[in-house]
Amino acid sequence: MPNTTRSCLLSALLSAVAVCGGDAVARVFPFGPRHRAVNDLANQFVPFHAHLWDLLRGRADGGLLLDWRAGWGTSFLPDYGTYLSSPFAPLVALLPRGDVEYAVYAVTVLKTAVAAAAMTFLLRRLGPGAWWWAGVLGAAYALCGWSLAEGAYNPMWLDGLIALPLLCLVGEWVREGRRPLLGPPVVAVCWVANFYTAYMATLGAALVLLVRLAVTDSFRVRTLARAAVTAGIGVALAAPVLLPVLLGSRHAHPGLVREFAPVAGTDFLARLLPVTYGFATPAAFVCTAVPLLAAALLFRRDVPGRERWLWPGLCAAVAASMQWGPTHLLWHAFATPNGSPYRQTFVLSGVLVLTAWTTLTRGGETNPARGRPDRRAVAGGSAVVLALALAALPSPVLTPWALVLAGAGLAAVAGALLLPRRGRYGALAALLVTGTLLGQAAATTAYADRERLVRLDDYPPLGPEQERRAAALAAADGWPAYRTDPGLPRVAGNDPLLLGGQGAAYYSSHTPAVLTATLDALGGGWTSRGRNLLGPDNPVTDALFGVGARWRDGAVVRTDTRLPLVTVRPPGPPPAYGRSPFRNQELLLGSRVYEAPHAGACRVGTEVFLWAPDATGPARLGDREVRLLGGRPKRQAAMASLGFQRTPGLRPSLPGPGALGCLDHERLRTAVTALRARAAVSVDVTPSGIRAVLPPGGGTAVVAAPAIAGWHCEGAEPTAYGGLLAVPLGPGRTELSCSFRPPGLRAGLAAGAVAAVALLCGAGLRSFPGLRSFPGLRSFRRRRSGHGTRSLPGRRRASAG
C-alpha cells in the first residue's frame, strides 16, 4: 500500500475513533442516554435533513425551489444552499427516516474523517516525511477544538474543514501550473458544499499560497492572476446556489447586530489547550504535538530563514487577525455572527498543522538534508508551548484536566521527537504521539459534550412519542385541501419539516422578513429575535391559513372552520395592520369576531385569548394554566388560549401586562361561510407553484402563503394582502397560475453557464493544440501581448521564435 494512502487511512481512522470514543466516554447519543439535541443541531440540521430525506424519497410537500411545509410556504433553495448542499447530505436517505439523528451523526463523523484524510493528502503533497506523522497531523487538524466543540453541532461547517486543505491543494496546482481544468470545479464543490466556511477557507488558502510562493522563490504576478481566475471561475460555477442564498439573506428578517469585542488574551491562550470550552471564545485547541512542532521551526538553524519565519509568522498573523475588529469582519464576510464570533478558528488550526509539517519535512525544495528537529529545536518549541500555557493560568476557561493533559502530551511528544528513529524506538515514538492525539481529542470531545448540554438550549430527542405524533399527522394529512399543523408542544424550531404537516413554524437564517412581520401582526410568537417562528394555535389564524387538523393535547384535533388555500376578496385596499393582533386578525378575515372583555372578564361561552408578548410565567383562568415565555427583543410569547369562559365575572390571573380578546366562535363560523362562497373551486399545488380555478366576479385572489420575493403570476403582477400573496383579478378572469423562482436563480444560472463555457473553452484549447495556431487567434494573441505590426523587429523575431 502506498505511503500516502496509508497515511490518509490512518488519519481518517484516528479521527473517527477519537470522536466516537469521546462521545462514548460522555455517554452521549448514540453511545449513551444523554442526547445531542442542542441549539441549531436540533432546531435546524436534523429537521432539514429529515426534509431532504423526504425530497429524495419523493414524499415532500414542495421541491428544490419551494417548500410548502414550513413557514406557510417559503423559498427552499437558499435553505438548501445553506444547510443541505454538502455532497455528504444525501447519505441520510440510506437510513430509515426515523433514524435521521443516527444518519446526521454518521455524516458528522464521516466529514471529520474526510477532513483528516484531505489534510493528510495535502501534507504528503507538500513534502516528504514519515507517513505516520502525516496521518497524525492530518487527524490533529480534523480533531481541532473548533471541530469538536463547534462543528459537532453545526455539521454543515465541517464542509469548510474539508475545503481548506482542498483549496490549498488547488493553490499548489496553480503555483506549479498544473491541473488548470480541475482547480475551478474543486473550488465550486467547496463553495456549494458550504459557502460560509468555504469563504473563510478560501482566505486561508490564499494566505498559504502567498507563503508557499515566497518560500519557494516562485512569486510571480501571473501566478496570482492564475489563482484569481481559478477561484473566480470556481465561485461562478457555484453561482446558481450562491446567488439565491445571498439574496435570501437580504430578504430575511434581520438578526441581532452586535459589535465585536475581542476576548481576553488569557482566554484565547487557554483555548489552545485540550478540555476547555467557551461559546464566545475561539476553540483553538490542536493536539499538543502541533504547537510544539510549529514553535520548534523557529529554532531550526538548518532551515532557511525565510521559511523559518514566514510559517510561524503566518500562524501569529492569523491568530492576531481574529482579535482585531476590521480583520474579524473580513473573516466573517463583513457581518459579526449572532452566535460564536470565532467561526474562522479552523483556519488557524490548519496553518498551525502546515507549519508543524514544515518542521518535520525530510528533504524538499530548499534543503534536501533536512530531517526531524534536533534537541535544541525541541527544547525551544517545548518552552514556547509551556510559556503559552503558563500565560493562560489566570483564565477562568482553564480546567485542571487541561493542564494535566497538556503537560502529559508535551512530555510525550517531546520524548517521541528525541527518541532514536529506527526499530522499536520508532514504534514507541509513534505510539506516544498517537496516544497523545487520541487522549486529548477524546477528552476534549467528552468535555464539550457535557458542557453543551449545560450551557446551550436543548430539545427533546426523537423517540417513540415523536414517531407516534408523526404517524398521526401523516394519517390526518389532507394537503392541499387543508393544512395539518404539528402543533404543541414544540419538539424543535422546524417541526413541520421534522414531524410532517404544513405549519407556520420555521427557523432559518433565511426566515423572510415579510413572514415574521405577518406572524407578529397576527399574534404569533418567536424566539431568536424573530427568526425562529412558533406556529400559532388560534382558530382565526387556523381558518385564515386553511388548517383543518392540528396536534393538540396528545392527539390530532380536526376543525371545520377553515378556508381553502385560495380565496377571493372584494375590490379595495389591502388591510393595514395596527398594534392589536385581535383587530389585525379581523382585518385579514374581513369580519369582527372578537369581543372586548367587560370589567376584565369575557362573556360566558366565548374563548378567552391572552396577548402578552413580553410576559414570562403562568397565566390561569379557572383550572386551566398556560405558561408564557416572552421578552422582546429576544423572544415574543404567542397569543394563547386560556379556555372558554364558563363562570360569569371570572378574571384570569396574568404573569404580566397583557390584553384579552373574547372569541365568538359562532361569528367565526359565519365569517368563514361567507368567505367560502368566494373561495377557489379547485386548488392544485406543484413543487414550484400553485394553480386554482376561481369563481367569476373579479376582486383579489389571496393565497394563504406569505408574499415572499420570487413569486410570478400569469396575467398580473403579484402583490401583498396583509402580508399574504395576492393577485388582482381582471373582469371575467377565473384562473390563477403562479410559479416561484427564488431571487438570484436566473442570474446565478447565467453566471454558472458563462463560467462553464470559459472552462470548456480552456479545455478545448488544451485538448486541441492546433487551435492555438489558428490565424485569427494567433493575431489576437499578438495584439494582446503587444507584438503587433508596430513592434520592433527584435521583438517580432523573439515572438516568432
Image (cartoon, helix red, strand yellow):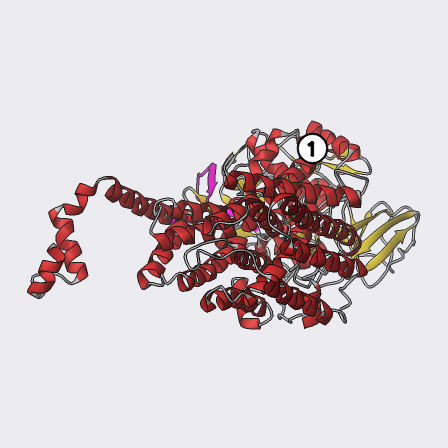
Question: Total number of numbered labels?
Answer: 1
Residue 663: percent from left, percent from top:
77, 48
Residue 125 appearing in the image: yes
Q: Secondary structure at mark 1?
A: helix
Residue 339: percent from left, percent from top:
65, 60
Viewer-nearest residue: 422 or 302: 422
Residue sitting at the far top: 475
Asked if residue 426 is positioned above or below residue 556 in the image, the reply reads below
Residue 84: percent from left, percent from top:
56, 43
Q: Quadrant of residue 561?
A: top right
How crowded pointer 1 is (Cα within 10 Å; few <14, some 14-19, many 20+) is rated as some
Residue 701: percent from left, percent from top:
52, 43
Q: Amino acid at mark 1?
A: Asp
Asked if residue 169 is positioned above or below residue 693 in the image, the reply reads below
Badge 1 is on which residue? 99
Range shown magenta: 724-747
